[in-house]
Image: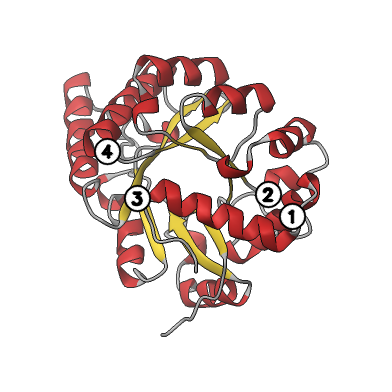
Amino acid sequence: MTISPSGPLFDTHCHLDHRKYDGKIDEVLTRAADAGVWRMTTIGCARTLEHVESALQIARAHRDWITTTIGIHPHDAEPPVEEGEVLDDAALRALDDARFAEVERIARDPLVVAIGEMGLDYYYDNSPREVQQLAFRRQIALAREVKKPIVIHTRDAADDTLRIMREENAADVGGIIHCFSEGPAFAKAALDMNFVSSFSGIVTFKSAQAIQEAATQQPADAILIETDAPYLAPIPQRGKRNEPAFVSHTADFVAGLRGVDPEELRWTTARNACALFGLTPPA
């Protein structure tokens, strides 16, 4: 199936390998192109060894307009095990090392433009916090080794996130604070370490005043937009399964916050994403 993306929207963070898109990927991509999405980055989350290449396979099939990342989400920092299976510490370490070895191998693929998403999530605590922190540090080191930017997930863990970024010299490669959900002070601290802020559908929610303030104050060359699809659909699509086509709503909302023309915001964020990921910018 041939899809001709127009542009210039760039959805910098979506999960096209999610089960909610099973059997529907062509129609999802067609709607994205019709909505003006020119490029997107599908996030590779290495939940298990079987998941490691799933996002990369989609990028390979659509390499003219889709790139990918690879990383271990904080939810999965502790290796998932089969229901009812009990592993001792040595077996868990072996499982984790095998998974990380695959992440490290795939990180060098040219279609992989960043490492992550990685970081800390103290809201759900699906993995022990000390395990999350170790996985975060290990992946920052990998990003610095392969010289690729970092995609960070942080929720209810602002202080520890910034501290570990500083301690591990994340500024050497910079990256993205994905699905930005903090305020202007956090955005500034991240930007001081070469991390730009990417705004998702959350910025359109009425309760998101601090996020909206950060989106208004963020320098023009340090702002991105994303969907985090299939999660967090923006208003007026809230409650639906999110998809890359809906990034247009977020772009237009952020443009309104900043008092700029929506087309200008689309071009600016697309160029920013290309600069970060080392891609050719839209003509």
Q: CA distance from mark 4 to mark 2?
A: 30 Å
**For mark 4, what is the residue?**
147
Residue designated by label 3 = 113
Nearer-the-camera pick, 138 or 172 = 172
First of labels 1, 2 by sequence position = 2
> Element under label 4?
loop
For the point 69% across and 54% down, the residue is 250
- Give the mark toward the camera: 2 or 3: 3
Q: Position of residue 274 (x, y in %)?
A: 45, 54
> Does label 1 or label 4 sit earlier along the sequence?
4
Mark closest to the chain's N terminus, 4 or 3: 3
Q: How is the image coloured?
A: secondary structure
Q: Amino acid at mark 1?
A: Arg
Residue at (38%, 57%) from the top-left corner? Answer: 279
Amino acid carrying label 3: it is: Val
Instruction: Tally the marks.
Output: 4
Q: Which residue is mark 2?
A: 201
Residue at figure coordinates x 37%, y 39% from the top left: 149
| Other residues around mark 1 within 10 Å, as few (<14) / some (14–19) / many (≥20) | some
Quadrant of residue 197 within the rendered picture: top right
**Residue type highlighted by circle 2:** Gly
Residue linked to disc 1: 238
Write the residue at 38% across / 40% down.
Answer: 116
Q: Viewer-nearest of labels 1 and 2? A: 2
